Amino acid sequence: MKRTKKRARQLAKLGITDFETVATTQRTQNDMFRRLERVLFDPDRLAGLEHCNERQCARRKCSEVCQVGTRRRRRKEIPAAYRLLNKSAGPFCEVRVGRGGWAQPVGKLDRVSIAAAKKLSRLALDKLYYPTLIAVGTFKVSVAPKHEGGGWKCEIHQIVSGAKKKELEKVFSSSRPAAGNFLRVKKITNLGQTISDVLKREVQGWQHLYQTEITPDRPKKVRRAEYYEWLLGLSSDERMVRYGCDRYFNKLKKKPRLVRVKNPKKRTCPRHLSPYLFGNHPMTCTCVRCMGPHPLN
């Protein structure tokens, strides 16, 4: 009891006011267990989940589907990520980026590629050439609205420290616009609360990028069952996104990357084609590359 109150005070100091309670997490755990019992043919895959609690895990290896374990990990990740980001110079930006190719229809959530989304985020941040850049976030899956088909929308939700808003918008913007792509970069005012929001992992409807006052509807039982079945095959750290730090949120020492600038290749004047250019004198060249008429050699 004393430990729980101490951790609650610690989160309150960081500006976090909506951290889920033990009772709320237990209700989510029970809902997860009931949904999986009805869709799984092998009950052994659920062994130990019903005995997990706040103090210990009843499974040999904790899975991402365990809501109690997820809350326990998030409670440790938030202060660690706050210490890491608070030591950096900033500025701090919240980034939500998604691609239409990541989205999946109903019943095909197991086709989602987390590795492809992480690769896109890493390559985008590599373009900035900042050795002090730090990013912490998660790969999230949400239920799309009805007018968009009600499938699954996937995104990278992360906090980036050390880059300006315009720079992040440039590197994360898609060079090939397509349906389903979205991006929002927002400056952070409350670092602690934003870290808590970024590291949330529960199943929910897709939150609009700009109409944040609209609360999405809770996913139905069928969607929750598919979501929990997908989580059952993931490791406890598979959805975490980190850049510039290790798994324990310790900053990595990086050397400055060399920026190689390619000089444009000089192209010679096509003087052998001068007699065939429109309006040319037989003995002069007026092509664009020569920037005006000159005698032919």
Image (tube, rainbow, N blue to C red):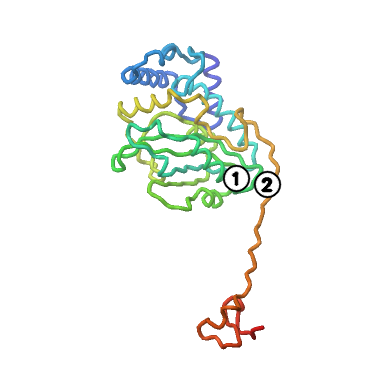
Q: Is residue 216 left or right of residue 15?
A: left
Which label number is shown at residue 126?
1
Looking at the rendered structure, the number of numbered marks drawn on it comes to: 2
Q: Amino acid at mark 1?
A: Asp
User: Camera-side residue: 124 or 167?
Assistant: 124
Pointers 1 and 2 in contact (C-beta within 8 Å): yes
Q: Quadrant of the C terminus?
A: bottom right
The vertical placement of 274 against 188, above or below, is below
The vertical placement of 205 against 46, above or below, is below
Dot 2 alpha-carbon crowd within 10 angstroms: few under 14, some 14 to 19, many 20 or more: few
Task: Please tell me in which quadrant of the rendered image residue 296 appears.
Answer: bottom right
Q: Is residue 85 left or right of residue 138?
A: right
Task: Please tell me in which quadrant of the rendered image residue 18 appears.
Answer: top left
The vertical placement of 176 against 41, above or below, is below
Q: Amino acid at mark 2?
A: Arg
Q: Position of residue 137 (x, y in %)?
A: 52, 35
Dot 1 alpha-carbon crowd within 10 angstroms: few under 14, some 14 to 19, many 20 or more: some
Task: Please tell me in which quadrant of the rendered image residue 49 appears.
Answer: top left
Q: Residue at x 65, y 36 (%)?
A: 87
Which label number is shown at residue 257?
2
User: Camera-side residue: 60 or 216?
Assistant: 60
Q: Residue at x 57, y 77 (%)?
A: 288
Distance CA(mark 1)–CA(mark 2):
9 Å
Label 2: element kind: loop
Q: Position of residue 86 (x, y in %)?
A: 62, 36
Among numbered discs 1 and 2, the one appearing first in the sequence: 1
Q: Residue at x 64, y 46 (%)?
A: 130
Which label number is shown at residue 263?
none
